[in-house]
């Protein structure tokens, strides 16, 4: 978990640069490079716009680190609902769930 937190921290600063925040175009680049599967599987063509609006708590069209940190949590929750919940509903054993690895 610590490694994951460090990865998210460095990822944000790599895309945000010296300014310390992301604008919509930067978010689109970040999502395309770091979450390509999530974007490819999105049914909404405006996924980055919707994500930006949801995460932009200050409503200033920028995302700071705290705003962006909710993005992986939200995508993980969506992936959980997409992959794990249907598997449990079909009666899949917990051992099979523990062997799952994301694409």
Image: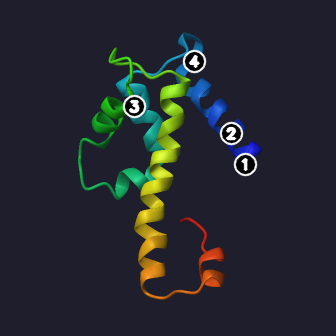
Q: Tag 2 or tag 4, which sits nearer the N-term? A: 2
Q: Tag 3 or tag 4, which sits nearer the N-term? A: 4
Mark nearer the viewer, 1 or 4: 1
Q: CA distance from mark 4 to mark 3?
A: 19 Å
The answer to whether 9 appears left or right of 34 in the picture is right
Q: Position of residue 59 (x, y in %)?
A: 32, 18
| Neighbour tally class for label 3: few under 14, some 14-19, many 20 plus, Cα within 10 Å | many
The answer to whether 55 appears left or right of 47 in the picture is right
Q: Are marks 2 and 1 in contact (CB under 8 Å)?
A: yes
Extreme-top residue of the structure: 19
Q: Nearer the viewer, residue 12 or 80?
A: 80
* Residue identified by numbered label 2: 5
* Residue identified by numbered label 1: 1
Q: Quadrant of residue 12?
A: top right
Q: Are marks 2 and 3 in contact (CB under 8 Å)?
A: no
Q: Which residue is rendered at x = 34% and y = 34% of the image?
A: 54
Q: Nearer the viewer, residue 83 or 31?
A: 83
The kind of secondary structure element at disc 2 is helix
Q: Nearer the viewer, residue 62 or 103?
A: 62
Q: CA distance from mark 4 to mark 2?
A: 18 Å
Q: CA distance from mark 2 to mark 1?
A: 6 Å
| Neighbour tally class for label 2: few under 14, some 14-19, many 20 plus, Cα within 10 Å | few
* Residue identified by numbered label 4: 17
* Residue identified by numbered label 3: 55
């Amino acid at each position: 978990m610590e490694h994951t937190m460090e990865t998210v921290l460095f990822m944000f600063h790599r895309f945000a640069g010296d300014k310390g925040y992301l604008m919509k175009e930067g978010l689109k680049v970040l999502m395309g490079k770091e979450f390509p599967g999530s974007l490819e599987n999105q049914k909404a063509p405006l996924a980055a716009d919707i994500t930006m609006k949801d995460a932009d708590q200050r409503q200033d069209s920028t995302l700071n680190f705290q705003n962006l940190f909710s993005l992986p949590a939200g995508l993980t929750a969506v992936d959980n609902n997409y992959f794990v919940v249907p598997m449990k509903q079909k009666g899949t054993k917990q051992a099979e769930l523990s062997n799952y690895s994301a694409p």
